[in-house]
Amino acid sequence: MGKSDHFDGRRFFNPTGATGQPFAAVLRMLREPRLPWPARVDLVPARPPALDGAAAAVTFIGHSTFLIQTAAGHILTDPMYSERAGPLTMFGPRRVRPPAVRFEDLPPISVVLLSHNHYDHCDLPTLARLAKRFDPLVVTPLGNAPLVQSAGLRRVEELDWWQEARTSAVPIVLTPAQHFSARTPLDRNRALWGGFMLVAGGARIFFAADTAYAPFFRDVRQRLGPIDLALLPIGAYEPRWFMQAVHMNPAEAVQAHLDLEAAESIGMHFGTFQLTTEGVDDPLRALEDALRAENVPPSRFRTLRHGESIRLGEQPPG
């Protein structure tokens, strides 16, 4: 791959110039006071709904994992079913809420959208289970194929920003994000990161994945057209000195919703792993405050209960 506005020939970067904090800053961040989280929040597992003629059914499994059911195939975003988000199953934050749809209750998965290589989004044990059970296609940004294939997945399509997948039955475009990549201190930004736009039965769904707020949201709207549903991160944003360059806070997520001109937005990336210092429910309260400040009706930007589903493009009865 040649140099571009986000690749210097060796490493990827954000066109805005924003960079994540160096690994040395992680130690300082870990010393920041943290609001307490519950050790466990139990929930009753949900079963995926019937599609029943809808263009798509979208179910919130937890963190950044959604099940998107369509007539052309079923999709998982950033699938994460492990108890910890970290290496070797013994390091990293432990999950507070279990996945809201049990793995054995998933319908046949034809496509996995994998946004970047961080442990809470690219979970190799979960990918290995998906490979064994479903053998799905994985669509992911440049540089992630070797990691994905190490989990036993045979079919991987890498994309650069604004490229469309060639091998998916569902139209999928990789979009920019402002973030970074790393599995170790030695591989920082060797692989790209991004979000996804997909079209299911005429319904246009934008999955932002992990990202800070940046001008590219307007570009997504201008280049790819109207958005029926945007899935936007609202958690893991404090302290701002550490997180602002890579994670939106709820107020910035509302601005992203406005930039995208989305018909509806759903918040994600909260309430599952304690990655940062805010309280478990702080993103929900901050989202309410931000919506009031911008005069955005709560029906236009909300969160789903874990396991809750919404349906897009339903035909009226009769």
Image (spheres, helix red, strand yellow):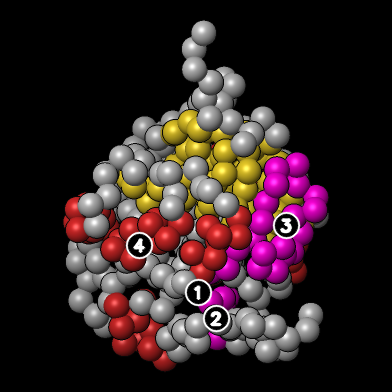
Please identify the quarter of the rendering in which residue 37 is found: bottom left
User: Which residue lies under the disc numbered 4?
Assistant: 255
Q: Give the SS element for disc 1.
A: loop
User: Which residue lies under the disc numbered 1?
Assistant: 179
Give the residue drawn at x 60%, y 60%. 223
Which of the two residues, 195 or 183, is positioned nearer the viewer here? 195
User: Which residue lies under the disc numbered 3?
Assistant: 164
Quarter of the picture holding the N terminus: bottom right
Q: Give the SS element for disc 2.
A: loop
Residue 73 locus on image (x, y percent): 68, 36
Give the residue drawn at x 37%, y 51%. 267
- Placement of 88 over or under 263, stated as above or below: below
Please identify the quarter of the rendering in which residue 92 is found: bottom left
- Placement of 48 over or under 13, stated as above or below: above
Give, as a three-letter code, the residue at label 4. Answer: Gln
Q: How many other residues sit within 10 Å of disc 4, few (<14), some (14-19) or many (≥20)?
A: some
Between discs 2 and 1, the one toward the N terminus: 2
Q: How many other residues sit within 10 Å of disc 3, few (<14), some (14-19) or many (≥20)?
A: some
Q: Which residues are magenta?
A: 157-185
Q: Cβ–Cβ below 8 Å for labels 4 and 3? A: no
Which of the two residues, 192 or 134, is positioned nearer the viewer here? 192
